[in-house]
Image (cartoon, rainbow, N blue to C red):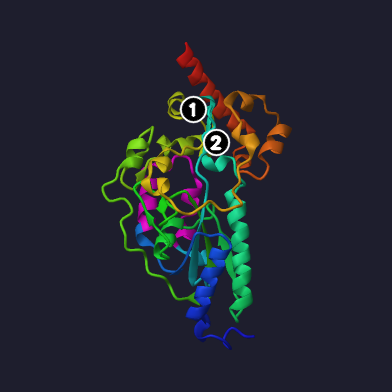
Amino acid sequence: MSRTSSFAMDKVPASMKEQIRQKALGLGFCAAGFAAVRPQADAMESLREMVAQGRHGEMRYLETGMPERADPTLLLSGARTVLSVAVAGPARQDRGHDEEGILSAHAAIPDYHLVVRSLLGKLLGFIRSEAGVPVNGVACVDGAPVLEKAWAEAAGIGRTGRNTLLIVPGAGSMVFLGELLLDIEIEPDAPLDFDPCGDCRACLDACPTGALTASGRIDATRCISYLTIELKREFTESEAAKTGPWLFGCDRCLEACPHNQARSVAPHHAFAPSPGILELTAEKVLELTGSSFRKLFAGTPLMRLGLKRLKRNAKSVLEKQKGKGG
């Protein structure tokens, strides 16, 4: 079937649009929405300002991916629709030994990049089987140069809160985002008309390092998640002091958010935590070998971190414990 022999201008009818949304929800996404590909000028301006001010730290990919973020057609020629999705992740479990090293909630579960990408692949397969016209699509998850929160807002699945994270009604901000870039036209959804935060400052007050410098504004160089996950080199003395007892990531602003405390959406079933990782402490990290590290963390986000940086984080935790004991 030729691309001009079916729907006018390859526009998917409203009934098909809702079938796609229902399929997304059936796959376990907690929200799915559609946006037309168009410039996201405000989001690009905010990103360029962050980079110009050095608040992105050493995340060079934020600098090199500017053209693709500004124009999704550089990732998919002829892209006309962004299908944004969110999937609920778990809350951090109380392990009872946080003083020995704290792990972010997503450290002990299957790598969300792999899970969300797999689900998007299934969703794209469904679209191709049902659309009636050839469909080209590209699945994007986190690391891809895409303005995830801007497209999610445009697609009506959430609004960005004071902690700079997308807040999805019912699911809060403990969510993982993904996108399908599609070269077919799907009627866009309207952005949500709600203020997720009001006068609440819980996330700003909870941040241990003051990384949330103002509403919707973050300085990554102060953020514990950036320091323990994104930063590739050894810590300076001041950086090590900021990381506190965290081995990987930081969930303080998430845990303080009323939307997360009252969320009604259960985590996706794929995100069952690994008991072995939940028992991890800073001392146990230093005992890991290359093979034991790979065995314990295969298929989890910690594989991306690597053993060298995990041990860097563990040494920082233990040094602070020693300082308190002395």
Residue 132, percent from left and from top: 60, 81
Q: Residue furthest right?
A: 291
Residue 58 belongs to the span the image colors magenta:
yes
Q: Residue furthest left?
A: 199
Residue holding disc 1: 245
- Distance, label 2 to label 1, CA atoms, is 19 Å
Amino acid beneath label 1: Pro
Q: Residue at the spot x=40%, y=61% of the render?
A: 153
Question: Magenta part of the protein: which range?
Answer: 43-70
Q: Is residue 162 left or right of residue 123?
A: left
Q: Secondary structure at mark 1?
A: loop
| Residue nearest the observer in this picture, 205 or 169 | 169
Residue 102, percent from left and from top: 52, 31
Quadrant of residue 118 in the image?
Answer: bottom right
Query: Where is 48 relative to 156, above or below?
Result: above
Q: Which mark is residue 213?
A: none
Q: Residue furthest bottom?
A: 5
Q: Residue at the spot x=48%, y=38% of the render?
A: 225
Residue holding disc 2: 232
